[in-house]
Image: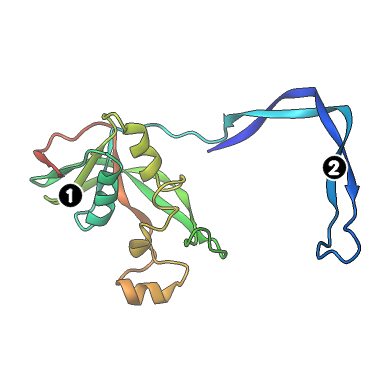
């Protein structure tokens, strides 16, 4: 996450304008503004850069459940390489424990954006053959990170994981999708590419 930062207060030249009221009988209700030809210099904070307000370590990659073919298709459309395990994998992975899920009440571009809060914890996991693996060691590795981190501005925020998390409809989502709110987010993060046979998804 990031926030805007000021480089300091600087003199900024602004053009003076004057309000011209609507003409009699005009449909316009508000005045329009015309330049006066005069300039003012005003001291203003200049916000022209960003600073990190939250950081997260770039992992080696992410495992996704075998049922997430739709998300894998979307990743592939972005040009991201995805592989699928040919055998079971056992190892230590980082599991995202969910503290809260909050859907925005107002719709934005057809979505009720989701905020996910929680933290990663190490856990011993067993993932079956057919699980998807998305490595960050690829040209679009940073995009992988942006799209798959649960509490970022990626696919979770845009509702692509709602089927497994529930939704702003609460219990109704569980009835429709066969899901209910979960304590863990449906992906697993690892520090390095796993030692397991895989084939590339095409």
| Residue 68 appears in the picture as rendered | no
Scheme of image coloration: rainbow
Residue at x-position 27% and y-position 39%: 79
Q: Position of residue 30 (x, y in %)?
A: 84, 58
Label 1 crowd bin: few (<14), some (14–19), many (20+), radius 10 Å: many
Q: Which badge, 2 or 1, is on the more N-terminal residue?
A: 2
Q: Nearer the viewer, residue 116 or 34?
A: 34
Asked if disc 2 and disc 1 are in contact, CB closer than 8 Å, the reply is no
- Judge whether 150 appears above or below 44 on screen: below
The residue labelled by disc 2 is: 34
What residue is at 86 percent from the left and 54 percent from the top?
A: 31
- On the image, the x and y values in percent for residue 115 come to 50, 54
Camera-nearest residue between 57 and 119: 57
- Answer with left or right where residue 160 lies relative to residue 85: right
Q: Is residue 127 left or right of residue 27?
A: left
User: Can you say whether 122 is above or below 32 in the image?
Assistant: above
């Amino acid at each position: 996450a990031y926030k805007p930062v000021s480089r300091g207060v600087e003199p900024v030249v602004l053009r003076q304008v004057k309000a011209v009221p609507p003409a009699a009988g005009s449909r316009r209700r508000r005045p329009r503004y015309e330049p006066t030809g005069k300039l003012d210099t005003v001291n203003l904070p200049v916000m022209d850069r960003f600073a990190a307000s939250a950081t997260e370590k770039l992992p080696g990659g992410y495992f996704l459940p075998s049922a997430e073919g739709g998300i894998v298709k979307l990743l592939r459309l972005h040009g991201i390489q995805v592989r699928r395990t040919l055998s079971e994998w056992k190892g230590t992975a980082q599991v995202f424990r969910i503290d809260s899920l909050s859907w925005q009440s107002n719709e934005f571009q057809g979505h009720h954006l989701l905020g996910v809060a929680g933290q990663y914890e190490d856990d011993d996991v067993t993932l079956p053959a057919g699980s998807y693996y998305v490595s960050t060691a690829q040209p679009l590795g940073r995009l992988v990170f942006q799209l798959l981190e649960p509490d970022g501005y990626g696919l979770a925020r845009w509702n692509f994981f709602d089927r497994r998390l529930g939704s702003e409809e609460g219990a109704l989502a569980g009835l429709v999708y066969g899901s209910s709110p979960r304590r863990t987010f449906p992906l697993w993060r690892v520090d390095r590419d796993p030692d397991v046979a895989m084939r590339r998804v095409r």
